[in-house]
Image (spheres, rainbow, N blue to C red):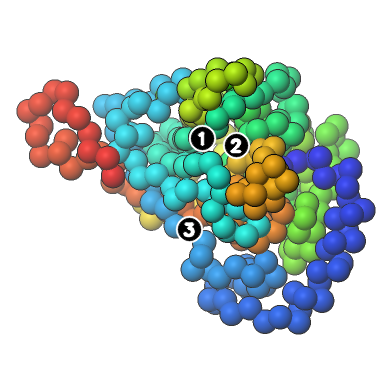
Amino acid sequence: MGNRFYQIQALILFTAFSLVPSFQAEETKVDAPSNPIESEVLKMVKIREADIPRFTAKRNRAADPITIDGKLDEPGWKAAQRSSRFVDMITGKPVKFDTHAAVLWDDDFLYVAYWIEEPDVRATLTQRDAPVYTENDVELFIDGGGGYYEFEINALGTLYEALFIWEDAYEKNYAAMEGFGRDQPGVIPFHGVGFNKHPRGKRIGFMRWDFPELRSAVSIDGTLNDSSDVDKGWTVELALPWKSMTILAKADGRPLPPQDGDTWRMDFSRFNQYRSSDDPESNGSKGWAWSYHGAWDSHIPECFVRVTFSSADAIGEEVEEDKESPSISVTRA
Ligand SMILES: [Ca+2]
Ligand SMILES: [Ca+2]
Ligand SMILES: [Ca+2]
């Protein structure tokens, strides 16, 4: 989700203020995260730490390279564990259409895939950084400690990207870097969307920032912008080079690529135009996510999925056991 909310900022502010007393008055039992800010945020959005999904990302085997063409037919994707079905972003309740994601990695790239059930695949925006969140999109957020990356893509493969840096990390880590001045074009103050009381404070949005050497592709199983038929949906395939994540890793100096057992926070979501008025099953929210946020706001890293990187290869057991066969089918996880 992006800037569309500025238009209704007054309404959001009013709503946020009216909700504050209930946040304070109603004690929500949560597990005790080690980070006090995380604990406070989860309390505010009424999410238990145990409710945040955990995922193990396995390595994609070098013998089976991933081709970024939008088709998720590589052995790695077939072997990778898929996420649980996406739920309503605010309530965590089931939604009408099926969405799953998966993550793989190797020494050079982070790979992300989405399977999106969509009976009427539509997209019109073609310009880079166009507000694709106003159409049906899927989104990826990657938290780096001092800031986080936002990625969005529509069914035409049009990208919208931005980088957000927390004010508390900016002066020490980013202010002196070329291209990261506050007076750069496309730099905006950012205080969240529907959850604009984040205890960590404010962020700076670098809206013109693009992830260097990002590869992305979409594949549609159906017809685009033709409602006369029923489409199966679309798939998205991404490869994000670790070497381009030095900006994200700058504040906490995390290893790139990650080491076995490292856990990163990432968010996987989908925004669409299905409204409660014509579709009761959508629960009224147009945002669906792997990990729900308890608020109309993607920009809450404390709610992101915990993705732990494993050095184990994403392969089916039969491949290991039958090394003689050159073209054995891979067992799904
Ligand atoms: Ca592929
Ligand atoms: Ca951008
Ligand atoms: Ca169609």
Q: Pointer 2: residues within 10 angstroms few (<14), some, or many (20+)?
A: many
What residue is pinned by disc 2?
Answer: 138
239 lies above or below 247? above
Disc 3 versus disc 2: distance between alpha carbons?
A: 18 Å
Furthest residue to the left? 324
In the image, is the residue at mark 2 within 8 Å of ligand 1 by its beta carbon? no
Q: Amino acid at mark 1?
A: Ile
User: Mark 1 to mark 3: distance in Å?
Assistant: 19 Å
Front residue of 64 and 232? 232
Can residue 11 be seen here? The reply is yes
Q: Local crowd at mark 1 within 10 Å, few (<14), some, or many (≥20)?
A: many
Quadrant location, the N terminus: top right
Q: Secondary structure at mark 2?
A: strand
Q: Is residue 134 left or right of residue 157?
A: right
Q: Is residue 65 left or right of residue 307?
A: left
Q: Residue beneath label 1, please? A: 116
Say if disc 1 is inside 8 Å of ligand 3: no
| Element on which disc 3 rests | loop
Q: Position of residue 227 (x, y in %)?
A: 62, 21
- Residue in the image at 81% along x and 69% along y: 19
Q: Which mark is residue 53?
A: 3
Identify the residue shown where x is 40% and y is 28%: 72
Q: CA distance from mark 2 to mark 1?
A: 9 Å
